[in-house]
Amino acid sequence: MRVAVGDLSDGDRRVVSEFLGGRPLTETPLPAAAFCAGRPGPASKATSTDWTGWGGSSHGTGFRTEAQAGLTAAQIPGLELRWAFGFPGGTVTRSQPSVVGDQLLVGSQFGEVYSLDAARGCIQWIHQGDAAVRGVVAVSEPDAGGKRTAVAADFTGNVLGLDVQTGVVRWKTRVADHPAQNVTGSPVIDRNRVYVPLSSMEVVMAQNPIYRCCTSSGAIVAVDLTTGAVVWRHRVIAEEAKEVGTNARGTAVLGPAGAPVWSSPTVDRGRGLLYVGTGENYTHPTTEHSDAVLALELETGAVAWSFQATAGDAFNMACTARINRENCPAPHGPDVDFGQSPLLTTLPNGRDLLVVGQKLGIVYALDPDRKGALVWKATVGRGGALGGVHWGVAAGDGRVFAPVSDRVTGIDPQGQPRPGLHTLDLATGTPAWSQPAPACAGRLGCFAAFSAAPAAIPGVVFAGGLDGHIRAYSATDGRLIWDFDTVQTFETVNGVAAKGGAIDGPGPTLARGMVYVSSGYGLFGQLPGNVLLAFGVKRQ
């Protein structure tokens, strides 16, 4: 749609939107009671309890100590809902909240960035952006003047630096340099740099048989935290696409293309590297850095080493269509991206590992000191287009926790699907325990699968399901210790009608004794929703 309406005025876009939606666009102001009394206090100092990026930090492991989370395993069965916040008009709630001191920062489907009081959910400030903020609103450490910057990347490829205390824009930079590029993953901040992942909608646009598929490349862009200036840009596919043939309609086919970066990159400051997961090629010829983990030099963006898990994976959404399949590559691949951030984690003996799950249904452990040499790999699912590991695994305390979807397991499925939560030994990849995804009991739009990233503390792992439940399991034996069904209507602190739905995309945020859960994912036929839920330990 962005390409189709790119030349229209705002008024014309409104007319098109109202026609497609079948109702007028209306804006209902939030009630005064939705806002906190007074202005936010001074910007919070950096503490170990902050959750400032995807998975909690620039390493993104999703694992928190008891001190960092403010939670113990013994407290989890007593979690209760403290407050609910509704996103006006929303159907997809996929921005993982960040928490810094008493502030919670979260993006929305329609471009807002909200600063909420983390304990009460009232609004401190709102920034209205241009397009959906799908990932984390990353937060910097305080600068020399004690100020912190919140960085939000929107779907159209704009990156914003906001003052944490006020929401005032410090800078705005467009990092996308192709009409189809977008940002689905989260920016990550390290010192005075912001690293932004770029994916592409050409994978969907290829369904149009007269579309000249394809010319985009996945990318990482490094931006200066203070000014927003672009420092370097790394194209996953170094060469520009050129015409390599025509499809059955006579439309030009171009390549190489694709290898998008769907997830947040991971910073390894000690080795001076940035780890990136990539997706499939959209056309032939395929390239060596698709379906791969790349290690880029932090200072320059140059490739230090790469690990390709699946070669020859040429795929786009035309391959799933019943008609208009002209742009499907021949032969096509299985569509098995790395959609999650590679996790930098440490074994009890001090050895570092990079752990990453793939849509193929395999979890890999790589050695960052041996240029990504494979340490172990473990099969946890059948894998495929909506199969395997989607948004992430969590790693810590000697375990890897891998949620598996296997909801749609490819156009050439092999073997049996294994939707559920699977646990592996961090050092060896040996399976520990597995819990199958609970059945949906006939709920319309419900799928028995785990697709969202998990999060963990010592003794407990949290996993959100496509059935709308957020569950906590014993990390030791997989026993269910807490369960909350988010598919219901909630009374919200901001007066917005809100309901929960499928939990997909981000895992929960664990900070300051609270568990924050984004609920609702109205894509791929899943249950829509528009609510952010905050859970705390039951008060005595």
Image: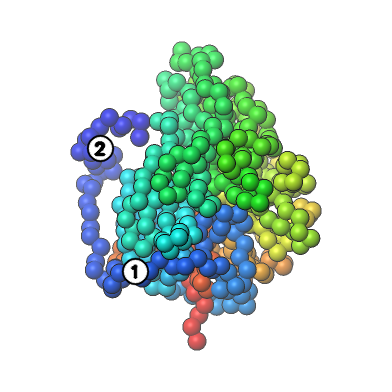
The answer to whether residue 84 is visible is: no
Q: Is residue 431 above or below residue 36?
A: above
The numbered mark at residue 166 is none
Determine the residue located farthest toward the bottom in the rendered image.
Answer: 540
Name the element at disc 1. loop
**Label 2 packing within 10 angstroms: few (<14), some (14-19), many (20+):** some
> Mark 1: which amino acid?
Pro
> Mark 2: which amino acid?
Arg
Q: Which residue is mark 2?
A: 13
Mark 2–mark 1 distance (CA, rounded to whole Å): 36 Å
Counting from the top left corner in percent of width and height, residue 423 is at: 70, 58
Name the element at disc 2. helix
Q: Is residue 414 above or below residue 32?
A: above
Q: Left or right: where does residue 529 sit relative to residue 344? A: left
- Quarter of the figure with residue 1: top left
In the rendered structure, which disc, 2 or 1, sits on the residue that comes first in sequence? 2
Counting from the top left corner in percent of width and height, residue 3 is at: 36, 31
The answer to whether residue 54 is visible is: yes
Q: Residue at x 46, y 12 (%)?
A: 250
Q: Which residue is mark 1?
A: 40
- Quarter of the figure with residue 16: top left
- Quarter of the figure with residue 57: bottom right
Judging depth in this view, the residue of 105 and 501 nearest the camera is 105
Q: Residue at x 73, y 40 (%)?
A: 371
Counting from the top left corner in percent of width and height, residue 518 is at: 46, 59
Q: Residue at x 45, y 15 (%)?
A: 251
Camera-side mark, 2 or 1: 1
Judging depth in this view, the residue of 308 and 401 nearest the camera is 308
**Total label count?**
2
Counting from the top left corner in percent of width and height, residue 118 is at: 42, 69
Q: Is residue 449 above or below residue 9?
A: below
